[in-house]
Amino acid sequence: MPGIFQTSLAAAALFAFAGAAVAQSLGDVSRGEELFGKCSGCHQVGPEAKNRVGPHLNGIFGRSAAGIEDFSYSKAFERAGSKGLEWHLDTLDAFLENPKALVPGTRMSFRGFDDAEDRADVLAYLRSYSASPANIPEADPTATPTDHDIDPAILAIEGDREYGEYLSSECTTCHQADGADKGIPSIVLWHEEDFVVAMHAYKNKVREHPVMNMVAGRLGDEEIAALAAYFATLGE
């Protein structure tokens, strides 16, 4: 299998290009930008974004609450962060609906967006300033569940972690082994079932992506299970 990613830079470009489409699928980015005007008095987002009354919102997906080191958060947010609150689609949606319900004691005066479509559009806009999951729904910042059927016998295969490590160099040509997700999503510490389901979706072309279809199409069931076992524990 070595050699599949000889054009890794081109592959990375394909991933980055796909990110914009994923953001659009969450909601209307342009409308979200307009709605974000209600937030812009305190928060900035974009290439020149800085902390203001509130922290900047670049890279918000997958970030811990109170996760920017050089910003002075309220005790309410520090408490929420220490208890494990992280910003994913579900938690961000809940916060945008009612900030004080999710983080009691927050200094934010904004009451929230009642309309679910408004929240989806704002999240799509914010999503465009986070790392691109590039058509991998299980990875942050998309963080939506898998929806593909797969033979239970395939899911029951116990992957050989050492074999997965041997095979992993093909994956880490694009995906970073340290879990970083700049431009291309992290696959480190993925749940094994999610990994297997995603790879078989690419293998069977239920999900369309030229690079992933090519890679997954060359892998057998045992090899996919081995990679899943390896990446599920990498970094632990």
Image: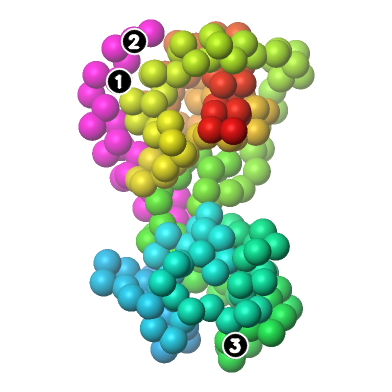
For the N terminus, the quadrant is top left
Q: Are marks 1 and 3 in contact (CB under 8 Å)?
A: no
The stretch drawn in magenta includes residue 103: no
Q: Which mark is residue 107?
A: 3
- Look at 62% across and 11% down and name the residue there: 160
**Element carrying mark 2:** loop
Tell me where residue 174 sits by quadrant.
Answer: top left
- What number of labels is visible? 3
Residue 4 visible here:
yes
- Three-letter amino acid code at the position of disc 3: Arg
What is the magenta segment's predominant secondary structure?
A: helix
Which residue appears at 64% of the width and 38% of the height? 146
- The residue at 42%/60% (across/down) is 59
Residue receiving disc 1: 5
Residues drawn in magenta = 1-29
Disc 2 marks which residue?
2
For mark 1, give the secondary structure: loop
Give how far across and how far down residue 100 sits, in percent.
Answer: 69, 82
